[in-house]
Amino acid sequence: DTGVSQDPRHKITKRGQNVTFRCDPISEHNRLYWYRQTLGQGPEFLTYFQNEAQLEKSRLLSDRFSAERPKGSFSTLEIQRTEQGDSAMYLCASLSPGPLPLYNEQFFGPGTRLTVL
Amino acid sequence: TQLLKQSPQFLSIQEGENLTVYCNSSSVFSSLQWYRQEPGEGPVLLVTVVTGGEVKKLKRLTFQFGDARKDSSLHITAAQTGDTGLYLCAGGSNYKLTFGKGTLLTVNP
């Protein structure tokens, strides 16, 4: 399977714990995105990388959230001191390279469902 | 802030019926994508429209992009139970996507 993969698919944690999610994009895609989706909403942009550089972060990404893409391949999203309001689906997407990257056709992974008790 | 409004929010129909869902924006996007999402899964790309007035067909699904590139519609002919899902539109600009809240479609047998 050469699609976007995410791990774990589900995570249940207690409030105050730290969690880390991993995303492996499509291999030739140099842009990688993180989104958060809550019930009844569409995905909301959190941050994105071009290769290893983090180019933009949403105001939704509080200082408890950090994302990395150290070698320009896989990425991790860490949430420190989780809160119940962090419960959501965390989606990763990737986009092919180029100045006109197929009109923003981002391909999504299956997501990580986080539940904070 | 660019916003995408989708309507209706919920739609429940019988198998075999036709339906249209809408996506309206306050701004112009360089591209517009439609995605379908099933519970517990990530969105799956259905189509990308770029040119104002563009119409694309994907089997029983017809997508239209408005002349002003600010609105779009998705029409499904003879809906099937397998069409059930959350239909999301997303506007693209500057390498980012802005999503609407989606239309949750239920096709009953």
Image (spheres, rainbow, N blue to C red):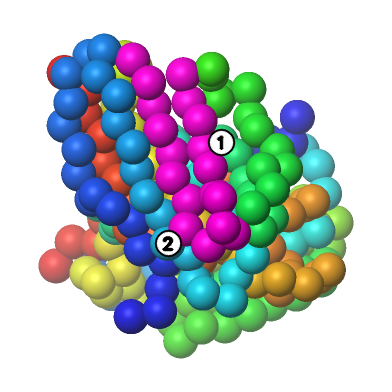
Residue under pointer 1: A46
Name the amino acid type tagged 2.
Answer: Asp
**Chain letter of disc 2?**
A
For the residues marked 1 and 2, what is the alpha-carbon distance in whole angstroms? 17 Å
Instruction: Say which amino acid is labelled 1.
Output: Leu
Quarter of the view holding residue A61 = top right
Residue A104 x/y as whole percent: 68, 63
- Circle 2 sits in a helix, a strand or a loop, which is it? strand
**Could you confirm whether marks 1 and 2 are on the same chain?**
yes
**Image quadrant occupied by the N terminus of chain B:** top right
| Residue B92 percent across, percent down from the top left | 71, 54
Q: Nearer the viewer, mark 1 or mark 2?
A: 2
Range of magenta residues: A64-81
Q: Which residue is mark 2?
A: A24
**Label 2: how many Cα within 10 Å (few below 14, some 14–19, many 20+):** many
Q: Chain of mark 1?
A: A
Q: Earlier in the sequence, mark 1 or mark 2?
A: 2
Between B105 and A108, the residue placed more toward the observer is A108
Rendered view: B21 above or below A4: above
User: Can residue B100 be seen from the camera position used here?
Assistant: no
Going by the image, does B80 lie left or right of A76? Answer: left
Rendered-image quadrant of the C terminus of chain B = bottom left
Query: Vertically, is B109 above or below A11?
Result: below
- Residue B65 in the image: state x and y as whole percent: 72, 65
Q: Is residue A24 magenta?
A: no
Helix, strand, or loop for circle 1? strand
